[in-house]
Amino acid sequence: MGIKDRRTKILLSLYLLSNDSFKDVFYSDSICSIFDLRLNRQTRQTFETLVKAGLIASKEIDQSTTYTLASGGFEELCLTFPCFRFNRISWDSVFRILSYEIPEEKRELRDKLRREVSSWGLGPWHRSFWITPHPIIPSLRRLVSDREEEQYVQAFEATHVFGDSTILIEKVWGIRKLESTYRALFKTWHSILSEQQDKSVKMTRVVTAYVGVLRNDPGLPKKLVGEKWIGFEATALFREIRDILMSL
């Protein structure tokens, strides 16, 4: 699936299997296989850690344990996959701007910070200026607090007052390229569904292809990309495919 972190796999699987309603999920062998999980000691410990942290909830049903994504787990997931956030909440029309001027002799520090925030839906506006519609300020504060890079970081919140937002969106996030990536994903899905394979195998391939695209989607709200943005179409199509392939 292209994701190494077990914690992220669990949060992602709970969301993809339950839409925005956060329904209970039982981790059968088939589901574990689809999301590249093994119910070994480490995985069970990760489930327990997530439950204790309030990021997911567990429930015993007929001597089986089911898990449900909690709001805190959803927020953590959105730091890796921001494309999910505005499926559940409305955008407040506020942009967050991150600026950092880290000296060249501290390049490793600068590169580390960039890697840590790279999945937060941020796009490069100008050199050392990054912008996002996502409410990342609390996460940013927690990230740099009491760390060396804190002294080099500035953050702002602002509304768009003047200018062509379409030009801004293309410049910062490269929406046209992302749209092409989604169209290629649709072709991949069509090819997978056309093959003679077990449903579980097909679902594994569908999820893997989808995750590869989601990781590069900044998750822009409808106010910026419009109601017919192809990413929203992909969400609906994925859920249709999932329901078909995971039906009894």
Image (cartoon, rainbow, N blue to C red):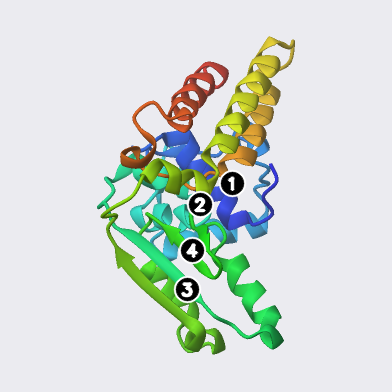
Label 3 residue SS:
strand
Which kind of residue does numbered mark 3 sit on?
Ser
Mark 2–mark 3 contact, CB under 8 Å?
no
The disc at residue 130 is 4
Which kind of residue does numbered mark 4 sit on?
Trp
Label 4 residue SS:
strand
Q: Position of residue 141 (x, y in %)?
A: 41, 77
Label 3 vs label 1: CA separation? 23 Å
Q: Residue at x 50, y 43 (%)?
A: 170
Q: Residue at x 34, y 53 (%)?
A: 71
Q: Nearer the viewer, mark 3 or mark 1?
A: 3
Which badge, 4 or 3, comes first in the chain's sequence?
3
Which kind of residue does numbered mark 1 sit on?
Arg
Q: Residue at x 68, y 22 (%)?
A: 188
The disc at residue 215 is 1
Label 4 vs label 1: CA separation? 18 Å
Label 2 residue SS:
helix
Label 2 vs label 3: CA separation? 14 Å
Label 4 vs label 3: CA separation? 6 Å
Q: Residue at x 57, y 60 (%)?
A: 118
Mark 4–mark 3 contact, CB under 8 Å?
yes
* Residue 18 vertical position relative to residue 186 in the rendered view, above or below: below
Residue picked out by circle 3:
99
Q: Position of residue 225 (x, y in %)?
A: 39, 37
